[in-house]
Amino acid sequence: MLLVLSSVAAFLFFGAEAVAGSLSDAFSPSVWGDVAGTRTGALLLGRVGLAVALVALVGVHRRLPQGTLVPVAFVIGLCTLYTFSAVGHPNTLHPAPVWIAVDLFHLAAIAIWLGGLIAFALLPRAALADDAGAQLAKRFSRWALIAVPVVVATGGALTWKLNRGLDGITDTDWGREVLIKVALVAVLLAIAGRSRFLLRRRSAASMRYTVWGEALIGLVIVGVAASIVSLPPEQPIRAQSYAEELAATNGLIALVSLGPGHVGSNEIHINLTPPGGSLAPVAGMTARVALPDGGIPESPVTLKQEGPNHYSGAVTFPRSGAWRLELIVQVTPSETQSLKAVVPIP
């Protein structure tokens, strides 16, 4: 149920971010429709459906034919993990399918390892004291021996690719948090080694406290990983104002200036020169921005008229990227011109 709620929240808040709006936009059906048509929005919405399917599977698992539960749960779980990899940092790498697959293996191995640890931590001590509990612990230990190297190898490969090597990894918040995560994983591996020693030399029940320690550190690692996802791997680039002269086929000219040119709120000014250098004011103008590569649909820019053929307004860019700016100018009541530009936001 927690997965369902968090998936719904991710979709709603992505909608508010995509239109650079307020919290109320997260609950707007029109915004839902807009973002559902984007790749990121569709994946987040798909995650909601998969989470609901998992909850339903838990509810009906006793009525399923024998041997059906595990493969169905595996497919749903794998598809759910894919929605995380496909909207994260690996989606920005080339070739994207390869690195999405690497991240998918990374997440799957983590799910097996930490998921098993948490399950064992929640078991009563008596459940680990009998032969069935001991066999279960040994089976999980064998799976963990496979999962841990996969976690380390795929995590190292992703870090290398995203940072383009290890040089300067401490220069960014992303790199520093990755190193914190690595240190925590090292501690976790040390405790896991102790757990395996207790399992082989004593009993499954004797490793209860070390498993609790592993599970708690694992949850901290998940929290750090969630923070890492929200940070850019690259060194932040200094904001730069944008100025460009746009021309339409009929001779309409628009001088666009935007500043300070960074993620967040920016001020935009547009000065128009009608066809032929006429001083006659245009009938009206609207503007909108979109980030196609980031799956953010078109959202309107609120403009006000400062004077004849001079418009200004505020535009919010929720993330960096090559934003597409489109001006729709009503030159006369019967003539409309569209001018487009790409605004780089570092």
Image (tube, rainbow, N blue to C red):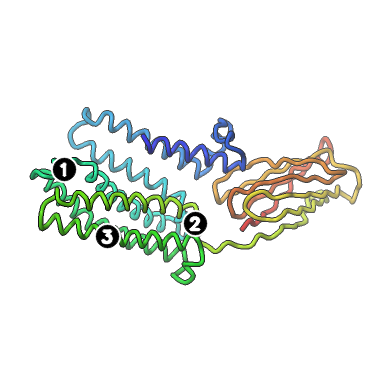
Q: In the picture, which quadrant includes the N terminus?
A: top left
Q: CA distance from mark 2 to mark 3?
A: 30 Å
Q: Position of residue 132 (x, y in %)?
A: 10, 43
Residue displayed at 44% across by 59% down: 177
Element type at mark 3 = helix
Q: Nearer the viewer, residue 16 or 174?
A: 174
Residue farthest toward the bottom in the current orientation of the protein: 167
Q: What number is the disc on residue 189?
A: 3
Q: Nearer the viewer, residue 55 or 235?
A: 235
Which residue position is annotated with label 2? Answer: 92
| Amino acid beneath label 2 | Thr
Point out the frontmost of discs 1 and 2. Answer: 1
Q: Residues within 10 Å of mark 3 (few under 14, many from 20)?
A: some
Q: Position of residue 149 (x, y in %)?
A: 27, 61
Vertically, is 240 above or below 116? below
Point out the frontmost of discs 3 and 1. Answer: 1
* 49 displayed left or right of 33: left
Residue farthest toward the left in the current orientation of the protein: 131
Q: In the picture, which quadrant includes the C terminus?
A: bottom right
Q: Given contact means CB atoms under 8 Å apart, are the residues at marks 1 and 2 in contact?
A: no
Q: What number is the disc on residue 125?
A: 1
Instruction: Find residue 337 and report its image quarter.
Output: top right
Q: Nearer the viewer, residue 271 or 37?
A: 271
| Amino acid beneath label 1 | Arg
Q: Residues within 10 Å of mark 1 (few under 14, many from 20)?
A: some
Element type at mark 2 = helix
**Earlier residue among tags 1 and 2:** 2
Q: What number is the disc on residue 207?
A: none
| Amino acid beneath label 3 | Leu
Element type at mark 1 = helix
Residue farthest toward the right in the current orientation of the protein: 279
* 48 displayed left or right of 113: right
